[in-house]
Image (cartoon, grey):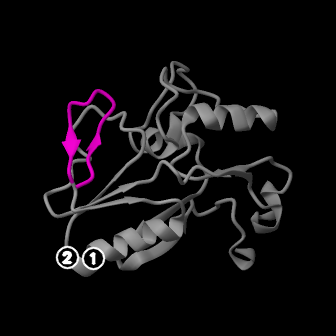
Amino acid sequence: MKEWKNTIKKYVARPAYFVKAKSVEELRDAVKLAEDKNIKIRAVGSGHSFSDIAIVPQGGVLVDISKIDFFQLYSKEKTKLAFKEKKLVETGGGITIKKLNRCLDRENLSIINMGGIDHQTIAGAFSTATHGTGINLPSMPGMIRSIVIVTSGSKIYRIEPENGITDPANH
């Protein structure tokens, strides 16, 4: 049986199925597995959470997204005209803030406001509203313009505000 522990080793999960997803498609497959077997699913990344949120009920699926850590410039062909001149990036939810910072630096970009820990995954930082000390600067969710999620039914959606960056005709 596979075992997962959070960073401080306080919480331990022993799921029936432990999936180390390397892509959104593999994440979708994990969701489908949980639905097909009618069992609970939880996701983990770096394990920085100090709560028991990642502990999947016995017999469930635990999916580790830390290998979904790609970094690329967002396709100009996919963006609306108003965003074509901006340098936007797309990352996997499992990329750590440390790796993201290094990738951004190579593109002469940076995170404008971040917390004091850099081993969190971007998905964890986003979902917990990680923030820095800049009073007039956004927390992590405020810096994200588009997000891809996997939902029940193994559906994949890209979610953006009404006037988002992606041109639906070219996506």
Which span of residues is magenta-colored? 1-14
Marks 1 and 2 in Cβ contact (< 8 Å): yes
Q: Secondary structure at mark 1?
A: helix
Q: In the figure, is residue 143 to the left or right of 29?
A: right
Q: Is residue 29 above or below residue 48?
A: below
Residue position marked by numbered label 2 in the rendering: 38
Inspect the magenta stretch and tell me whether residue 53 lies in it.
Answer: no
Tell me the residue at 74%/49% (across/down): 88
Q: What amino acid does circle 1 point to?
A: Glu
Tell me the residue at 80%/35% (across/down): 106
Q: Residue furthest right?
A: 85
Image coords of residue 127 (percent x, y): 41, 45
Tell me the residue at 54%/38% (across/down): 96
Q: Nearer the viewer, residue 27 or 155?
A: 27
Q: What crowding class fits label 2: few (fewer than 14 Cα within 10 Å), some (14-19), or many (20 or more)?
A: few
What's the CA distance linking mark 1 and mark 2? 5 Å
Q: Residue furthest front?
A: 1
Tell me the residue at 57%/53% (across/down): 92
Q: Nearer the viewer, residue 113 or 138?
A: 113
Q: Nearer the viewer, residue 108 or 56?
A: 56
Q: In the figure, is residue 46 to the left or right of 40?
A: right
Q: What amino acid does circle 2 point to?
A: Asn
Image coords of residue 147 (percent x, y): 55, 58
Q: Is residue 27 above or below residue 142?
A: below
* Position of the N terminus by quadrant: bottom left
Q: Secondary structure at mark 2?
A: loop
Residue position marked by numbered label 1 in the rendering: 35
The image quadrant that residue 99 belongs to is: top right
* Position of the C terminus by quadrant: bottom right
Q: Is residue 108 above or below residue 64?
A: above
